[in-house]
Image: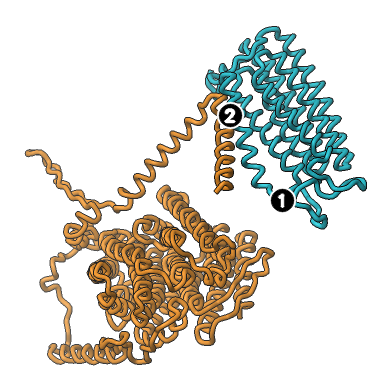
Amino acid sequence: MQIPPTQPSPPHGGGEGFRGRPAMTFSDTGYDIAHLLGGGILLLSFVLLYQRRLEGVITAFAIQGGLLAAAAAWQGWVQDEPGLYVTAFLAFGAKALLIPLALRLLLRRLGLHRTVEPALGIGPSLLAAAALVGLSVMVVLPVTAGQAQALTRENLALALSVVLLGMLMMIGRRNAISQVIGLLSLENGLILAATGVRGMPLVVELSTAALVLMLALVAGIVVFLLRDQLSTLDTHVLDRQRGEGP
Amino acid sequence: MLTALILTLAGLGLLAALAVPLARFAWAGLAMHGGCLLASVVLAGCGLAVLLAGALPVQALPIGVPALVAVDALSAWFLLLLGLAGSCSALFGLSHPLVAPRLLAAYPLFLAGMALTLIAADGFTLVLGFEAMSIASWVLVAADHAQAENRRAARRYLAFALLSGICLVPAIGLLGGVAGDLSFAGIRAAPPQGWVAVAVLALVVVGAGAKAGLVPLHNWLPLAHPAAPSHVSALMSAAMTKVAIYVLARLLLDLSGPAQPLWWGVPLLVLGAASAVLGALRANLEENAKTLLACSTIENIGLICIGLGLAACFRAADLGVLAGLAAGAALLHALNHAMFKSLLFLGMGEVAHAAASRRLDRLGGLIHAMPWTAGAVLVGVAAAASLPPLSGFASEWLLLQALLAAWRVGDLAFQVLGVAVVAAAALAAALAAAAMVRLFGLVFLGRPRTPRAAGAVDGPMPARLALLLPAGLTILFGLLPGTLLGLAEGAVQVLLPFGVAERSGFAMVRVGDGGARYWPLALTLLLAVVGGAIWWLVRRRAPAGVARGPAWDCGFIAPPQHLPFGDPVTQPSAAGFGQPLRRMLGGSLLAAHESVVMPRPGDPAPARLTSGYADPSEAWLLAPLARWRDALAVWAEKLRDLPLTATLMLPFGTLVALLALAAWLEAR
C-alpha cells in the first residue's frame, strides 16, 4: 500500500479531499458511512455466531456480502478509484448472490442437518467475540496513531475484528458448511481491510476474489464428498480419517 | 593493498567456480592447489606488510550488498598465520592433490571464507565469511563419505557448525543494538552493557568456542580431523580454529569495549583450562595419529583462550603491562601452534600415504625409512612438547609468566582461580609433552609393526618442502620470539588500547616489569655447546671402531620365520603406552574403565583384558541433548494427530497471543 508522501497529512481526518471537495473531517459523511458499513459487517459477524439454524447463517452471510459490496463501492466513490467498483460488483455477485444460492441448493440437496451443532456454546463464543473485538481495537488504534488517516484506522480495527470472528466461527462450529462460511466471512474481513486502504492495486483484490471462488468450490466438493462417503457433515469424524491407514 | 586482497578473494572464488568443469583434466588438482598456494602467499604478504606499515582503511566490498572490509593489525596477524598455514597445506596438496570435483571447489572456498572473516569490517561480512568457511570445510570433512564413520563425523561437524551460526548471528545483532549499525566502528562506539553484554558473552563463547573446540563443544574435532584429507585437516587445525579465536578476540576484547568488568574474561579462562587438560589427556590415550593431533589442538586452543581471558581480566584490573603480556603470549602461541600443528598433520599425512595407516599400532621404525619426514616431525613434536629453544616453549613460557602474575589482581576469588588455572596449564603442558613422546616413539622409533610400515619411503619434493617450510619456521619463530612480539605489538594494541610497555628485543624477552627473562639465542648457543661437549666426550671415551651387536637387545628377540618384522607384542602398543596415565587421571576425567575376563577353571581360552574411556561431553552434553531432541520429536509428532478444531486453534491462538503481546507492549 502506498500513501503518496507529497500530500500533507493532518493529524486526523481523511487527508486531502477528492474531486475538489474539502478535506474530510471527523464529522464528514464519508467517514460516517464507511464506519456504518464496516460496523454493519462486524455486527453480522456476531449474527453469524449466534445463529442456530443453517438457513439463518447463510442469510446473514449473504447480507454481510451485500454490505461488503456497499462498503467497497462507497470506498470507490470516496477514493475516486474505479477499480473498487469492480471489487464491489464481484463481492456482490459472489458473496451476496452466488455462494449463498449455492449453499442453499446444497442444503436442499442434502436435506439434513438444518441445525448448527456448536462445539463452543453460543454464550461463550459471543463473549469470546466481544473480547476479540476489544483486543483488535486495542492493537490497531495505538499502532496506527498519527500515521494513517482516521478512516483507515477505524476500518482496520473493524476488519481485524471480522477476521478474528471468522476464525472463531471456524473453530466454534462442527458443521462443515458453518466452517466454510466462517472461512468466507474471514475473507470478507480481508477485503474490507484491502478496500479501506488507498492505493491497493486492483489485481490484488481481483486475485483475492478469484481465490474465494476457488475456496468455495473446493469447500463444496469437500462437503459433497463428506456427505457421500461418511453420510455426515460433522467434521469431527475426519479426525479418525487421516494418514495412510484405513 | 586491500584491492589486492579483494582480488585474491575473487580469484579464489573463480578457482572454485572453475574447479567443477575442469575437474576431468588430470592437471586440475595441480592448478587448483597452485592457485591456492599463490593466494596464500599473497595473504601472508599482505598480513606482514600491514603489520610493518600500518592498518588499511575501511572499504566497501563490490558485491551489491553493503559489506565493509578493512585490515588492522589484529586482522593482519591472523592473515599472516592463515597465509603461512595455507602455503604449507597447498604445497602438500601439490604432491597429493584432491581429485573429486566437489573437493576441488570446496578447498579454495574454505580458504576464501577464512580470509573474508579475517578482513571483515562489519558484522554481516564476518558472519558471511564464517559461514562460508563452515560449509566449505563440511564438504571437505565429508570427502570420503563412503565410510559410515566419516559420514557420522561430517554430520556432527555440521551440527556444531550450525550451532556456531545460530549463536553468532544473534550475538552480532545484539552488538549492533537498536540502531542496527553493524560496522565495527559503530559497534565500538556503543559497546554492549548490562544483560546485553552477558548475552553477547555467552553467545560468542558458545558460537566461536564451538568452532575453535573449547571444551564442552570440542566433540567434533577428534572425529572430523581424521575424516578430512591430511592437508585439509592441517588447515582446519592450524587456521580454522585460529579464525574462531580471532572472532572471539575481535568480538569480546575489541568490539565489546575496554570497560568490561573483571568476570568478562573468566569464562574464557575456565573453559580454556578445562580444554587444555582434557585435550592433553585424551592425546595420551588416542590410538589414531590424527585423532591424537586433534586432541592436542584442543589443548593448545585451551592455552590460547587462557591467554585471551587473562588479558581481559588484567585489563579490567588496570594492569596494562600484564594484559599486554597475556595477549601477546596468546597471539604468539596461535601463530606457533599454527606452524607446528601444520607440520605435524602434514607429517602424519605423509606417513599415512607411505605406510597406509594412521593407527599407531600399525606403524613404527619409520625413522629409517622416512628420514626427512622423521626429522621434520621431530622438530614439530619438540615444539608441541614445548622444549626450548623451539617456538612452543617461548609462547607457553610467556603464558605461564602471565598466569603466575595473576595474584596481582586484588580479588581473592580471582587469585584462587588463577592458582587453579596455573596448575591446569602446567599439567596440560606436561601431558602434552608425554603425548608427543608417545606419538614420536610409536610412529618413528622401534621396529616396523607391519610390512607396509617397513616399506615406506619419503614423499616427493613438494611434500618434503611442505614439511621443511613449517619446520624451518618453527625453529625460526623459536629463536626470535622478541621480534615476533614486536611485530604483534599493533595487534595487542587493538585488543588493549592502553598501557602496553615495550618489553621485547631481538635477543631477549623480558616479562612486564618483573625480573624473568628469556634469551632464546643465548639458550640455543648454550644447548649447542653442552650438546657438542657431551658428544665429544662420549666419542672420546668410546673405543675406536664401533661394532653393532645383539647384546642384551632390550627384550627384542630375533624375529621368527613366520614374523619377519618381529612379533608386534614385543613392542609397546599405543594402548599400553597410555595405560599409566589412563589409570592415574582417566578414571575421574574420562570415565576410563578396565576389566579382566578370566576363563573358567579348566577352560584353555585366554583371559581377556578390555579397557576404554569415554569423553565426558558425550555423556554430559550430547546424550542429554539427543534425549531432548527425541522427546521433542515425539512431542512434535503428536501435532499430526490433533483434531481439526485443535489444528485451527493453534494458528488462531498464536495470532491472538501475538496481538495481545502487541497491545501489552503498546500499553507500556
Residue B597: image location, x then y, percent: 15, 44
- A130 up-or-down from B19: above or below: above
Circle 1 is placed at which residue position? A147
Viewer-nearest residue: B601 or B331: B331
Q: Give the letter of the chain under mark 2.
A: B
Amino acid type, mark 1: Gln
- Chain letter of mark 1 equals A
Q: Secondary structure under badge 1?
A: loop
Label 2's element? helix
User: Which quarter of the rendering shows the N terminus of chain B?
Assistant: bottom right
- Disc 1 to disc 2, how far (Cα)? 33 Å
Residue at horizontal 58 percent and vertical 29 percent from the top: B648
Q: Residue B648 — which label?
A: 2
Q: Residues within 10 Å of mark 2 (few under 14, many from 20)?
A: some
For residue B288, side relative to residue A84 (left or right): left
Tell which residue pokes out farthest to the left in this image: B601
Query: For chain B, what colour was chosen?
Result: orange
